[in-house]
Image: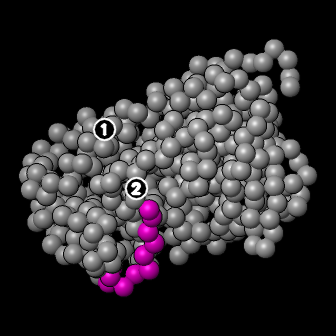
Amino acid sequence: MIASSSILETLTIADACRVEWDLVVVGAGVSGSIAAREAARRGSRVLLVEKADFPRRKVCGCFLNANALAHLAQLNLSSLLVDSHAPSVRGVFLSAGTRQAYLPLPAGAALSRAWLDTQLAREAVAAGASLLLRAEAHLIGVGSDRCTLRLNQGDADAEIASRIVVAADGLAGRLARESRDCVQTVNPCSRIGVSAAMARAPEGYQPGTIQMVVGREGYIGALQVEDGHLEIAAALDPAAVKRWGPGKTAQRILQCSPLPQLQGVDELDWQGTTPLSRHTSPPAGRRIFFIGDAAGYIEPFTGEGMAWAIASGAAVADIAHQAAQCYSDDLPRQWIDRRERLLRGRMRLCRLVTQSLRYQRLTEFNVALLSHLPFLATPVIRWLNRPRSYASADVPRCPTSR
């Protein structure tokens, strides 16, 4: 139940050592591949490093909301949705206890990460970026004019130089811990992310909708994607997962829901993440910029995380490209400010929403209220889905090339 198309790396680890790169982007997820594509389009020599191979599953709800679709359109990537036959998504069924409500959503799309990530990496390569797969990157030094990284690929080990590093290595990424300028902090009350896939949707499932169930141990979303299988993603309490495991915990949350039952969830092959809620402070240091989940993560609810990843990958490209051409100590601050303007308000709202879901009685009351008055959720839904340009003020250009 993953994309059948694959992608081949464009160079060997030995080849990578022979080039002094303008940018090394670590992590070929949504944010990293878009950053690599946009920087390569601007003329940077870009190496995109990914520790896995394609296609691969990711722990994700696989929903692209209206904001995410608007960002893809700005990047001229809307054709990916057409090529994949991604289903349109226009609503969410929200359930807590025995209560349920249907909330209309601005049109979004359902697209598996196995397919989307593969195609975005292809787009980066088509734009001129080089791609190295099955390789881990470690930051071993930052000098006055370049960064040094160590690449590990199986038995091969090599050092490479780059003027700038863009860290898109996700929740469990090492670069934040290896950078002297930044500290990654994990919320001690954070839930963990898990996901699994079912071959087909249950009887009674309405195509084009998200099925969301909130329980005492967390919340679960289910969505049918482009090839017909059902993606299931959840944010679960670590204590419950430790006691029962992800499948059994999911089953406990789902068993009282009036929504179509997902049979056999306790027997699925579940993937998990480290704790979800964390932030890297600051999200930039000398010659290194953090984007996507590597910069910070707030539990999203219905597709916000994907929109944040697309936007931050696109927004960092101009600053990172300029930093490679003519570095100044002001450029990390420019990225911090740009990211704040782009994401802070939406992240704060998602934090409030997901924190409220920890109170089961309050959630059941709210769902019962929304079942009769669904328009009460409209302002929040519209604001989270409101398209906003990832662009910002132009980055000052160097008077001469490097």
Q: Which mark is residue 349?
A: 1
Tell me if mark 2 has few (under 14), some (14-19) or many (20+) residues whose alpha carbon lies within 10 angstroms of its own.
Answer: many
Mark 1 neighbour density, 10 Å: few (under 14) some (14–19) many (20 or more): some
396 part of magenta stretch: no
Q: Nearer the viewer, mark 2 or mark 1?
A: 2
Residue 350 position in % (x across, y down): 32, 43
Indicate the quadrant containing the C terminus: top left, top right, bottom left or bottom right: top right
Name which residue lies at 60% across and 42% down: 180
Q: Are marks 2 and 1 in contact (CB under 8 Å)?
A: no
The answer to whether 40 appears left or right of 90 in the picture is right
Q: Where does the magenta region start and end?
A: 264-274
Q: Earlier in the sequence, mark 2 or mark 1?
A: 2
Picture quadrant where residue 376 is located: top left
Q: Give how far apart the Cα atoms at labels 2 and 1 are.
A: 16 Å
Tell me the residue at 33%/34% (across/down): 383
- Describe residue 383's horizontal placement relative to residue 152 as left or right: left
Q: In the figure, residue 398 lies in which quadrant?
A: top right
Residue 245: image quadrant is bottom left
Q: Residue at x 63, y 22 (%)?
A: 330
Q: Is residue 233 above or below residue 168?
A: below
Q: Which residue is mark 2?
A: 276
In the rendered image, the vertical position of residue 116 relative to residue 6, given as above or below: above
Colour logic:
one colour
Q: In the rendering, at what x and y percent does residue 22 appear?
A: 79, 39
Residue 189 % position (x, y): 29, 54
Helix, strand, or loop for circle 1?
Answer: helix
Q: Is residue 347 visible?
A: yes
- Does dot 2 land on a helix, a strand or a loop? loop
Answer left or right for 28 relative to 392: right
In the picture, the disc for residue 212 is none
Instruction: Please check the rendered image and state whether residue 271 is part of the magenta-colored stretch, yes or no.
Output: yes
Please state which amino acid type lies under the numbered disc 2.
Leu
